Image: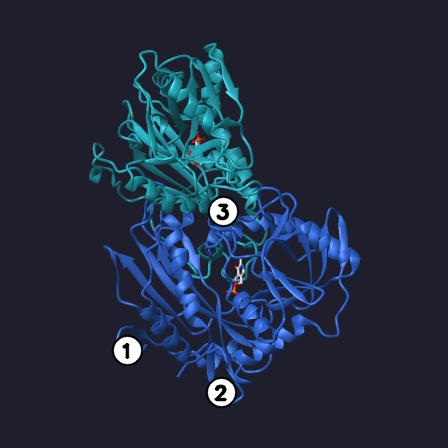
Chain colours: A blue, B cyan
Amino acid sequence: MNSSTTEKIKIQKADKSRIDQVDFENLVFGNVFSDHMFECDYKDGSWQTPTIRPYGSITLSPAAKVFHYGQAVFEGMKAFKDEDGKVWLFRPDQNAKRINKSSVRLAIPEFPEEIFFEALTTLVKMDRDWVKSGEGNSLYIRPFVFATQAGVGASPSTEYKFMILMSPVRAYYAGDIQVEIAEHYSRSANGGVGAAKAAGNYAAQFFPTNLAREKGFQQIIWTDASNHEYLEEAGTMNVFFRVNDTLLTAPISDRILDGVTRKSVIALAKRDNIAVEERRVLVSEIVEASKNGSLKEIFGAGTAAVISPINAFSFQNTTHNLEKQDDSYAVKFKKELTDIQRNRCEDPFNWRFEVV
Amino acid sequence: MNSSTTEKIKIQKADKSRIDQVDFENLVFGNVFSDHMFECDYKDGSWQTPTIRPYGSITLSPAAKVFHYGQAVFEGMKAFKDEDGKVWLFRPDQNAKRINKSSVRLAIPEFPEEIFFEALTTLVKMDRDWVKSGEGNSLYIRPFVFATQAGVGASPSTEYKFMILMSPVRAYYAGDIQVEIAEHYSRSANGGVGAAKAAGNYAAQFFPTNLAREKGFQQIIWTDASNHEYLEEAGTMNVFFRVNDTLLTAPISDRILDGVTRKSVIALAKRDNIAVEERRVLVSEIVEASKNGSLKEIFGAGTAAVISPINAFSFQNTTHNLEKQDDSYAVKFKKELTDIQRNRCEDPFNWRFEVV
Ligand SMILES: Cc1ncc(COP(=O)(O)O)c(C=O)c1O
Ligand SMILES: Cc1ncc(COP(=O)(O)O)c(C=O)c1O
């Protein structure tokens, strides 16, 4: 292994790339990882030497607090390669800030944004061959941090590990999706951790989502836990409803993730003179709009899912189907968003970030 | 290392015990572990060979789903040594059942109760010297299970690790405790995972608990997430309120852990002809009872905390102090419970389980 050091990061290079062993045409989302990973430990009150080393296993105490108390948060972002071979990140400042917001809520020490950026860009540069150009291809980037102190007392850890893994991916959902509107289970509580990308939020959704899958729905649209009256978001994406030509989406709250894709769609809609209402959306209102024909589209928005059209939703054992629209907003926003992400158009909002 | 096999468990013994290095008078809760641990992996749809080996580190993929999606649940139980050197567990069947109940909610495969019992008893027998007799001493036992499959797609893991660690402990709380009643943050949602011992439930409490600590409170009593009107439970214990001579405690729901200590206190109270009401308890009712002098005691009940008297609670920036009672129920139940646990009296409910 070659060793070197950037200004801040200690680097151990892999002897040999594993890239030739990868079938890029048949990737399962998040199952294959690039040659290198980033790692930085927190102890004695500060972050230690940041390190990039070959992707590989880690050794922990079985008493590490992450296993017992779920003290862990993460981020999800993507790198894109344009037709000229340039590599781009999309609004990475948002993820740098959000992981720290999540960390604060989970009593995890914040990670310095400056090291986050240096880690991210160094890592992407080293593994830039893993970013494939072409529609649907990207390198999914997973920064995360978790509690490593050994101890089974229920209190915040004094030690943590911050890591970044990278995984070449294609589309998250193959086609259109059907969703169930939550009537019994819920994702998050008022005053809870729903607004954080906290690890435990995701495990909590697996069982209800399995039940939904058995009924033929890929995802659940969560509703407020108090009365299941208001629509909130899906498991890994925020949700938009198009009623006539107006877009509706739930407002950000302590139960909902402040999605980067969501806020980008809102910005694009405003630019395009499409009315957007960020407000509480009643389930009954959407059911009614479906019945009277004013509900034109539903789509999810998220880094992994990009823009995912939802062509049916189920509520109170009734499935409401949505017709394909010729002037689909989902199709329009997906194109506008991916054109910016992949450097196929101007970047009016300054969202693109080139990795050089 | 000696190797041997019980009927089902593969055993590797430690060459040398670490027990002589332990200062049993000055234990921090859950920071020291006994010589051996239990480990059993799930893959290809079934639990593999159960193993006991020397306590030590584990190696995992950094993409193991537990780090990303918090798919992990645990249990907490204790072994006690009586004056004759016999070792006892307390209602272990409850923990065997509850960990599987938690697992189901987190989409984790259930662990066979029979192997759970064999693991538990074999491990406690091997490390029986770590169970110290004498008031306050016990061996805290931590069964837990977490997702090990490498993959950052948000779906249930196909691989898991079930483990049992053991830690010699003394009392969890040194003295009486002060609590804050939650008015903004909350622990769990209707239809959420509050009734499961899910790892993520605990991390979610650290930040609000830190805020409470800064104000001088050791714990928070959580209230319903909808309106913060009803009292639920504390972070690691269920809570009882004594109003005049009646005990009040929140009913079990999908937001509250069905505590073994809680149900044991209820059984003891009934035997002792003390009225117990399992019903929703209004914060306002307890504040009122405090004002008019009918609120005699508040105490927490849990495996780690045993019975912990609470001598003050804060609500709306007012601290309500409780006077010491001569006929304290907390003191009475603590004695009755620990007498049964430590084989100092009859066992009318058949709660004790001897490890031979
Ligand atoms: C719960 C949840 N909502 C929404 C999103 C979408 O957020 P973003 O657009 O930042 O990826 C995600 C993550 O991707 C999520 O986990
Ligand atoms: C949230 C919570 N409530 C209550 C309890 C008490 O349960 P038990 O008496 O079974 O230990 C615990 C755990 O010990 C807990 O984690």
Q: Which residue is nearer to you in this view: A325 or B249?
A: A325
Q: Provide residue A319's location: percent of width, then percent of height.
A: 76, 54
The foreground one among B201 and B304 is: B201
- Which residue is tagged 2? A85
Q: Amino acid at mark 3?
A: Thr
Q: What residue is disc 3 on?
A: B49
Element assignment for label 1: loop
* Spatial CA span between label 3 and label 2: 49 Å
* Mark 3 crowdedness (10 Å alpha carbons): few <14, some 14-19, many ≥20: few
Answer yes or no: do the residues labelled 3 and 2 have beta carbons within 8 Å?
Answer: no
**Could you say where residue A5 lies in the image, as x and y percent from the top left?**
27, 77
Quick check: B338 left or right of A88? left
Q: Residue at x 41, y 25 (%)?
A: B287
Q: Is residue B81 above or below residue A332?
A: above
Quadrant location, the N terminus of chain A: bottom left
Residue A45 higher or lower than B350, as above or below: below
Give the position of the C terminus of chain A as an image quadrant. bottom left
Q: Which residue is mark 1?
A: A6
Mark 2 lies on a secondary structure that is loop
Task: Name the kind of residue labelled 2 in the image.
Answer: Gly
Q: Share a chain, discs 3 and 1?
A: no
Q: For mark 2, does the 10 Å Cα neighbourhood hold few (<14), some (14 to 19), or many (20 or more) residues?
A: few
| Image position of A78 with respect to B268: above or below | below
Query: Mark 1 — on which chain does it sit?
Result: A
Is the CB of mark 1 within 8 Å of ligand 1?
A: no
Q: Residues within 10 Å of mark 1 (few under 14, many from 20)?
A: few
Given contact means CB atoms under 8 Å apart, are the residues at marks 3 and 1 in contact?
A: no
Given the image, what chain letter belongs to the residue carrying mark 3?
B
Please state which amino acid type lies under the numbered disc 1. Answer: Thr
